[in-house]
Image (cartoon, rainbow, N blue to C red):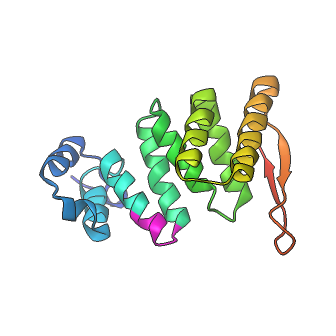
Amino acid sequence: IQTELQTAIAPTRVGAGETWNAAATDDALRNEDELSYALRTHDVFNPLANFNLGVLRGKAGRHEEALACFLACAFRCSGDIEAWRNAVLSSMNLRNASMAAAVIDCALRVGGVDVRDAVRKELCAQDANEEQIEAWDAVLTTAEAGIDRTGKGVLFRMLLGDDQPPLTFSLH
């Protein structure tokens, strides 16, 4: 017997999600409606569907929605450094410094130096300028050192430019 509470929770039917993955066409993997349907009806934490949906939403400029997809991948496969790298990179597009700091903190606590190195490698692959790479190196290294030293985190500010207010990151 289903209750209201059970119907309000997105189902996790891993077998159905895997069957969907196996049968999914390239078009389905590039279709936001198909991916959303698969997540809603089969497996809300399906890594393939979440990754593809995150990419689509990120390209559409819907960065918070993209981040939610990448975090679902990271939490489902917590040992997957690439999943955490995607979540950190996605958080860089947010204007919400607290959210970005929380993602960075969580990713570094789970993956440590491997996440930091994966983010740096991806930034280099994306032809980020040296200043951007150095800034994110400093952010990730400082955050990691703060986690290691205190277990609580650190506080630092990023100055974006004359016309934009600074972002303050607080990692606790």
123 vs 42, nearest the viewer: 123
Visible residue check, residue 128: yes
Horizontal arrangement in the rendering, residue 150 relative to residue 94 (left or right): right
Q: How many marks?
A: 0
Visible residue check, residue 46: no
144 vs 109, nearest the viewer: 144
Q: Is residue 89 magenta?
A: no
Q: Residue at x 31, y 53 (%)?
A: 49
Q: Residue at x 53, y 48 (%)?
A: 87
| Residue 164 coordinates in the image, percent (x, y) | 81, 71
Above or below residue 165? Residue 168 is above
| Residue 6 coordinates in the image, percent (x, y) | 32, 54
Q: Residue at x 34, y 52 (%)?
A: 44
Horizontal arrangement in the rendering, residue 157 relative to residue 95 (left or right): right
99 vs 61, nearest the viewer: 61
Q: Is residue 59 magenta?
A: yes
Q: Residue furthest bottom?
A: 163
Residue 73's image quarter? top left
| Residue 23 coordinates in the image, percent (x, y) | 12, 52
**Quadrant of the snapshot with the C terminus:** top right
Q: Which residues are magenta?
A: 56-62
Q: Residue at x 42, y 59 (%)?
A: 55
| Residue 83 coordinates in the image, percent (x, y) | 46, 41
Q: Residue furthest top?
A: 149
1 vs 113, nearest the viewer: 113
